Image: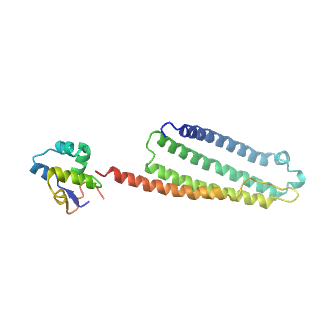
Amino acid sequence: MKHSTALPAAWIMLRILIVLNWMVGAAIAALLIATIVAKGWTFTALGIGPEDQIRSVIVGLQFVAALGLVTIPLNHAMFTRMLRIVETVRIGDPFVAANAYRLNAIAWILLALQVIGMTIGGIGRAISTPHHPIHLDAGFSAIGWLAVILTFVLARVFAEGTLMREDLEGTI
Amino acid sequence: MAILVNLDELLHDRRMTLTELAERIDITLPNLSILKTGKARAIRFSTLDAICGVLACQPGDILRFGPDEGGDGQD
């Protein structure tokens, strides 16, 4: 376990994800601004012709982009907490109350991301027309919800484990 | 906590130091000191067994239930 490559790999991956997340956020923000400043040009560039640029489609896609922006700080909060957990494992002291709180926060973030994902999926279906179908890679995800439940359970296990450790440390 | 540790009196009666007891029961001096000052959360049967063996006493001689003095800020 001491020489596991999973830990440094996770640390590097999380660092990359934090940067990528903000880059994606900047791209979504740019797209959202473009749909307001240069509406016609942007939607034509996205493959939505002038005949399909009805108000509901435009507002729907702008709302999807805005929701996408909301996920950026949520992702950041999740990745930074995961990074802190990995760092506690690296220094050899992961069973601390702070990690239980971090896992609990990650569980709530995952829950929020699932709800946002389902909302985006719902908007996609609502604005999709037979003439111009819109397929958004979002919606209900059984694995996603399983991850939410698993993380909540893990957070509880961590909290209990931390208490047990504290008790054990006070046992002579 | 209202459980009081009588280790001080027992050691005094047996003319034994805490360091000597720690060496004989194979427990570190800081841990034994935590037990003596009543700051421990729990005591193992094996520890109690070792102390009783060395001091030739009963568990009840080491531990007693008394009024909560609240000096240690324990539970």
Q: Which of A110 and B52 is in front in this view?
A: B52
Q: Name the residue at the right extreme.
A: A51
- In the image, residue A51 above or below residue A15: below
Closer to us: A10 or A80:
A10
What's the residue at 20%, 63% (across, down)?
Answer: B67
Residue A3 in the image, given as x and y percentages of width and height: 50, 36
Residue A94, percent across and down? 46, 45
Q: Can residue B8 be seen in this view?
A: no
Q: In which quarter of the image is residue A123?
A: bottom right
Please report the residue visible at 51 percent of the width from the left and 42 percent of the height from the top: A86
Total marks in image: 0
Q: Position of residue B2 (x, y in %)?
A: 23, 61
Q: Is residue A126 left or right of residue B14?
A: right
Measuring 78% from the left and 61% from the top, which residue is drawn there? A126
Q: Position of residue B48 (x, y in %)?
A: 23, 54
Image position of A38 with respect to A146: above or below? above
Residue B64 visible, this orientation: yes
Coloration of the structure image: rainbow
In percent of the image, x 21 and y 44: which residue is there?
A: B22
State the residue in front, A86 or A108. A86
Rendered view: A158 above or below A22: below
Q: In the shown orientation, is residue A2 left or right of residue B39?
A: right
Relative to B31, A76 lies left or right: right
Q: Is residue A161 toward the left or the right of residue B67 in the image?
A: right
Instruction: Quadrant for residue B17, please give it.
Output: top left
